[in-house]
Image (cartoon, rainbow, N blue to C red):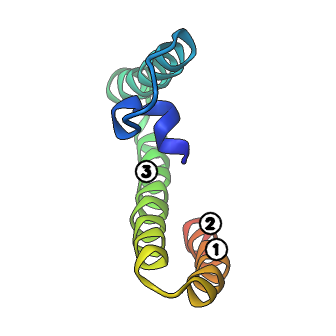
Amino acid sequence: MVSWFFIPALNPEAERSAVTILAAALLAAGALGQVYRYARISHPTERQQTKWVVFSLAIMVVFGSVIVGLEEILPPALGAGLSAMGMNLVVGLSIC
């Protein structure tokens, strides 16, 4: 899973490598840079746009997590169909 790459503690067999630490550091630096820009540099219009982007990303994370969770408890054939249909729906909702 992708989360294993960013959060090695989720994979008990994974060792912390330089690549994982670098990826986490870059992700954190990018997030902190966006917070600084939002708080100190952005104008009201840019702040509103940022709120919409964060909202759409939150929708993707929540619905994506629900779909992956349902995929785990449903039979394989139904779970695969739900995953394909659900991920398209998640991306579509976040774009609208």
Horizontal and vertical percent for residue 83?
60, 76
Cα separation between marks 1 and 2: 5 Å
Circles 1 and 2: CB atoms closer than 8 Å: yes
Give the mark, 3 or 2, whose residue is nearer the N terminus. 3
Q: Which circle's residue, 3 or 1, is located before the other in the chain? A: 3
Tell me the kind of residue under disc 2.
Ile
| Callout 3 amino acid | Val
Q: Which residue is mark 3?
A: 54
Q: Secondary structure at mark 3?
A: helix
Q: Is residue 82 above or below residue 45?
A: below
Q: What residue is at 40 percent from the left and 71 percent from the top? A: 69
Q: Are marks 3 and 1 in contact (CB under 8 Å)?
A: no
**Marker disc for residue 95:** 2
Say which residue label 1 marks: 92
Asked which secondary structure carries label 1, the reply is helix
Q: CA distance from mark 3 to mark 1?
A: 15 Å
Mark 3 to mark 2 CA distance (whole Å): 12 Å
Q: Looking at the image, which residue sits at the far front?
A: 13
Residue 17 percent across, percent down from the top left? 51, 14
Work out whether 33 lies above or below 1. above
Give the quadrant of residue 42.
Answer: top left
The amino acid type of the residue labelled 1 equals Gly
Image quadrant assignment for residue 96: bottom right
Callout 2 crowding tier (Cα within 10 Å): few <14, some 14–19, many ≥20: few
**How far across and down, in percent of the image, does residue 78 sit?**
58, 90
Is 32 displayed left or right of 26 in the figure? Answer: left
For the residue pair 28 and 6, the one nearer the viewer reads as 6
